[in-house]
Amino acid sequence: MLGMGGSVKFSVFQSQKKEKDARRVFTNTLYMVLFFAVLFSFAGLFFSHHISRLLGADANVFSMTNTYLKVLLLFAPAFLLNDTILCFVRNDGNPKLSMTAMIVGSLSNIILDYIFIFPCGMGMFGAVFATGLAPVISLIILSGHFRKKENHLKVSFAPISSRLCLAGITLGLPSFITEVSSGIVMIVFNYIILGLEGNVGVAAYGVIANISLVVIAIFTSLGQGIQPLVSRSLGQRAHKDMKAFLSYAVCSSFLIAAAVYFFTFQFAEALTAIFNSEHNPMLQAIASDGIKLYFIGMFFAGCNIVLSLYFSASEHAIPAQLISTLRGFIILIPVSFLLSGIWQMTGVWLAFPVTELITFLVGIIAYFRIPRYIS
């Protein structure tokens, strides 16, 4: 939220040669990062045990949960700063470094997980310590950007501006909702499926959810990829370029969705078998059927994600927030309960494509309601 929202304003000001305002945006975003970092670190230091209990940790897992949560929250400053700087570096004309930092940081987490847990025997602390070091390693790589002459990410030490903070949060809120909605979808679907098919049904949905997260991440990368280009074009009033970038991203999302759907439809049984190590026939049948229905929604999900990030990048926060909330909360939850009540598991799988289709139609209407950006 902070990184995407702040970097949109930064990119617009940079393209307008308003260096002072761009520095103020960067500085105010860092102020907000500091605020949330202190908040989360304080929660980890003094309330991790309460949060663990609240999340349902019983005597068997409380110690491990509390350890993991406490250390994770203590690393909150690194996580928040890393995600924020990644966005700003990408918008400051250095997307390759931003990509490198993210890849290396993520891979280091995997490697350090193994080293700390097995050779070092550090257990749960080792697992969370590896996770906490990942953004630190990423930040070390990103620090190279600040030594370059082309770097425009400078702190102005100006007083905090509530106007700029609010603008950053407002423009970044759709990205926040998109991230959070993935968890909401899982909770709602797990609750419904548990009542229909029990634990086996939940396990079957786990297969679909894992594959879906990867595909959604691809669509998110498309939207984030055009964001600096759209924001810069906005500042330069190059509206035709904005339209072109959106068209490329939407067409790409449809092509990716078509390839994904063809692959998942043709190899639904094989994909399910990868996760079904116990060869449970019921799980195999539920997940295979679900994949073929659920992934129809990818044709519309990709466009919705791209369109939401486009609206944010062009400083249209309300339609961006509308798309994010419709597909994440407002439509999805009632549609899931309604269709599952009518068609049982078939209704559960169809809830996602129906939600994305309705959101897609709303997004198209919202887009053509902003005529000056399509001319």
Image (spheres, rainbow, N blue to C red):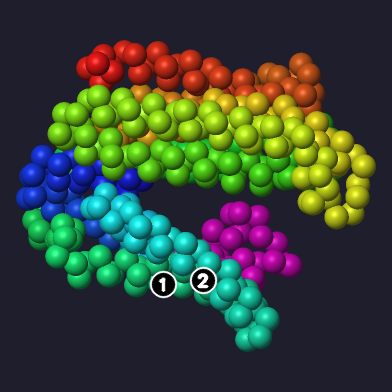
Magenta residues, as a range? 47-75
Left or right: where does residue 305 sit relative to residue 299? left
Main secondary structure of the magenta stretch: helix
Quote the CA–CA distance across marks 2 and 1. 8 Å
Residue kind at label 1, given as amino acid type: Ile
Left or right: where does residue 136 sit relative to residue 271? left
Residue occupying image coordinates x 53% and y 28%: 254
The numbered dot on residue 42 is none
Residue occupying image coordinates x 28% and y 56%: 94
Left or right: where does residue 78 sit relative to residue 69? left
Viewer can see residue 40: no
Residue 218, magenta (yes or no): no
| Image coords of residue 14 (percent x, y) | 14, 45
Task: Specify few, some or many for label 1: CA neighbours under 10 Å numbering under 14, 14-19, or 20 or more.
Answer: some
Residue occupying image coordinates x 50% and y 64%: 106
Residue occupying image coordinates x 41% and y 38%: 223
Contact check, label 2 and label 1, Cβ < 8 Å: yes
Left or right: where does residue 147 sit relative to residue 218? left
Query: Which one is in front, 35 or 298?
Result: 298
Q: Quadrant of residue 135?
A: bottom left
Query: How many numbered tags mark residues here?
Result: 2
The numbered dot on residue 108 is 2
Label 1 sits on residue: 137
Q: Quadrant of the N terminus?
A: top left
